[in-house]
Image: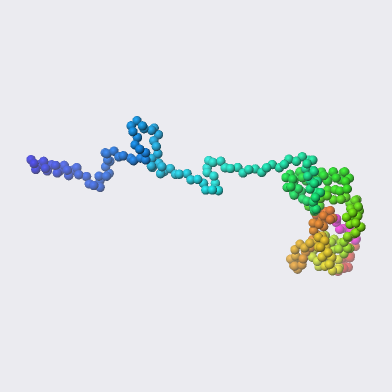
Amino acid sequence: MGDEEHGDSLADQAAAWIPPWARHREPSTQPVEVPTTETASQPGDEDPSPGPTAATDAATPTPRKPATGGPPERGRPRQRVPSPPPAPVLDDAELRGALEAILLVVDEPVAETTLADVLAQPPERVREMLRTISTGYTAGGHGFELRRAAGGWRLYTRPEYAGYVERFVLDGQTVRLTQAALETLAVVSYKQPVTRSRISAIRGVNCDGVIRTLISRGLIEECGAEPDSGAHLYRTTTLFLEKLGLDSITDLPPLAPFLPDDVEDLADASR
């Protein structure tokens, strides 16, 4: 009897034995406590909104502040660049007076864009006012006029009063260009850019001294070299346009009315 009971107990134990590698797969019947960062709450103190756990904190990224000078964060309004101050409002009388005051002190023709920048006004308005002033001076019969020359505007004395102005400025002394200088200047004006040898060939005499005189007077200047021969090229200056009261070289009078009728015959004879 004792042996049978002992045998049965050993058989029962063998049937109920579970290998170690299979034991952890079975669900545990014991409750598992989950540690939290907060203290355990007492009964009756439960918060309806559970606090963050360690896993939630680890999964939530910490926002970084942008580096200095970098782009702003999303959602933050960008700083607006301050707009430039508005241009001062000038009525016609004030604009006219300002232009006249500037034109009285300039020593060379001043461009419309320069006047517009100084007065902070649209170039179209400045251009229209300059034309109005010029028309008013002409209609008023003043001893001076406002003309456009050498790409800008300047006050000039009227041609009919040139004799009085010359007498005052020169005090009886006459400073004129020689005939040779005038001829050379005319060749440069109509043939520019032109070399020194070409000028001498047209005039039939050496023009080295005359060219140096015109350069010293500021009427002509060098403007590069000829690609084939490397000779210096010459052209007229802005002072030349200013002295003649021209806006550009295209305003020079045509030469055809001043040429002789047999100019072709003379050209063939010179060959």
Q: Which colour assignment does the render follow?
A: rainbow
Judging depth in this view, the residue of 42 and 117 nearest the camera is 42
- Residue 187 seen: no
Residue in view at x 38 percent, y 40 percent: 53
Q: Residue furthest left?
A: 1
Which residue sits at x=80%, y=46%?
Answer: 101
Q: Is residue 13 left or right of residue 50?
A: left
Residue 177 sits in quarter: bottom right
> Seen in the image, is 18 located left or right of residue 4?
right
Q: Position of residue 139 (x, y in %)?
A: 87, 44
Magenta stretch: residue 253 in it?
yes
Name the quadrant of the N terminus.
top left
Looking at the figure, which quarter contains the C terminus? bottom right
- Residue that sits furthest to the top in the current view: 44
Let me know if residue 130 is in the magenta part: no
Q: Where does residue 63 sit, x and y in percent of width and height? A: 47, 44
Magenta residues? 252-261
Q: Residue at x 80, y 58 (%)?
A: 237
Number of numbered tags placed on the structure image: 0
Q: Nearer the viewer, residue 117 or 14?
A: 117
Of residue 261 and residue 46, the one placed in the foreground of this image is 46
At x 88%, y 46%, the residue is 142
Q: Position of residue 26 (x, y in %)?
A: 26, 42
Q: Position of residue 98 (x, y in %)?
A: 78, 44
Q: From the image, give the main secondary structure of the stretch colored magenta.
A: loop
Answer above or below: position of 103 versus 184.
above
